[in-house]
């Protein structure tokens, strides 16, 4: 009976037919390698993205967080000073919009105005600076929370003593506006 076995029924030929071609093996190895490289590239890109997000968050934290603005107008209703309030860094930044300068024995003093309270001094504006900054303490931050207007008066060189109001009329005055986020 072994003489009559056909090549299809021969066990040796069945084993030969089930062997995988070397081309298929090479293709499988190549695809596995491509899958590994793709995964490593994706992971690398994800890590770079996380690093960029951390960097941008750091930059955003360093940016001023302006919450309130005021444009102070002169007697002719022309813009004279732009005031921005950053409660996070506890600073008021002023930007001069005209050429008015104080004299040698004078100082510009910034005030927070509220309808039912006496004016509160927020500090002296830096002499001859285009964009001076004033630090804010807790009392000034609280006053700004309820203030409706800001104003600037011309005072003596050292400013008005604590607890007193301005000695001269307002040089500049404007409404304080809460900035929408």
Image (cartoon, rainbow, N blue to C red):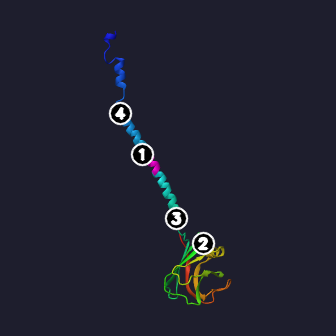
Residue 122 rendering spot, x and y as whole percentages: 62, 79
Name the foreground residue: 137 vs 26: 26
Residue drawn at the location 33% of the way across and 33% of the way down: 23
- Residue that badge 4 annotates: 24
Q: Which residues are magenta?
A: 38-44
Which mark is first along the chain, 1 or 3? 1
Which mark is first along the chain, 3 or 4? 4
**Can residue 54 be found in the magenta stretch?**
no
Q: Nearer the viewer, mark 4 or mark 2?
A: 4
**Can residue 39 be found in the magenta stretch?**
yes
> Residue at the right extreme?
163
Q: Are marks 4 and 3 in contact (CB under 8 Å)?
A: no
Pointer 1 local density, CA inside 10 Å: few below 14, some 14–19, many at least 20: few
Pointer 3 local density, CA inside 10 Å: few below 14, some 14–19, many at least 20: few
Secondary structure beneath dot 3 equals: helix
Residue drawn at the location 43% of the way across and 42% of the way down: 36
| Number of the label disc, if any, that sits on residue 38 | 1
- Residue that badge 2 annotates: 90
- Residue that badge 3 annotates: 60
Secondary structure beneath dot 2 equals: loop
Q: Nearer the viewer, mark 1 or mark 2?
A: 1
Secondary structure beneath dot 4 equals: helix
Which mark is first along the chain, 2 or 1? 1
Residue drawn at the location 63% of the way across and 76% of the way down: 140
Pointer 4 local density, CA inside 10 Å: few below 14, some 14–19, many at least 20: few
Which mark is first along the chain, 4 or 1? 4
Name the foreground residue: 170 vs 22: 22
Whole-number angstrom distance, CA of label 1 to CA of label 4: 21 Å
For residue 105, side relative to residue 6 (left or right): right
Up the image or down, 132 lies above or below 58; here it is below
Name the foreground residue: 92 vs 47: 47
């Amino acid at each position: 009976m072994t003489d009559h076995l056909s090549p299809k029924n021969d066990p040796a030929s069945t084993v030969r037919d089930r062997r995988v071609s070397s081309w298929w093996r090479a293709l499988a190895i190549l695809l596995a390698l491509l899958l590994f490289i793709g995964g490593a590239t994706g992971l690398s890109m994800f890590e770079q993205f996380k690093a960029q997000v951390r960097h941008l968050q750091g930059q955003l934290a360093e940016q001023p967080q302006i919450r309130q603005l005021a444009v102070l107008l002169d007697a002719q209703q022309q813009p004279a000073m732009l005031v921005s309030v950053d409660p996070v860094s506890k600073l008021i930044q002023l930007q001069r919009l005209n050429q008015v300068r104080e004299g040698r024995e004078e100082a510009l003093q910034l005030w927070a105005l509220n309808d039912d309270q006496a004016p509160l001094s927020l500090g002296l504006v830096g002499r001859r600076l285009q964009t001076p900054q004033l630090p804010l303490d807790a009392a000034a931050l609280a006053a700004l929370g309820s203030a409706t207007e800001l104003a600037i008066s011309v005072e003596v060189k050292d400013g008005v003593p604590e607890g007193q109001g301005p000695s001269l009329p307002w040089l500049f005055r404007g409404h304080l506006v809460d900035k929408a986020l």
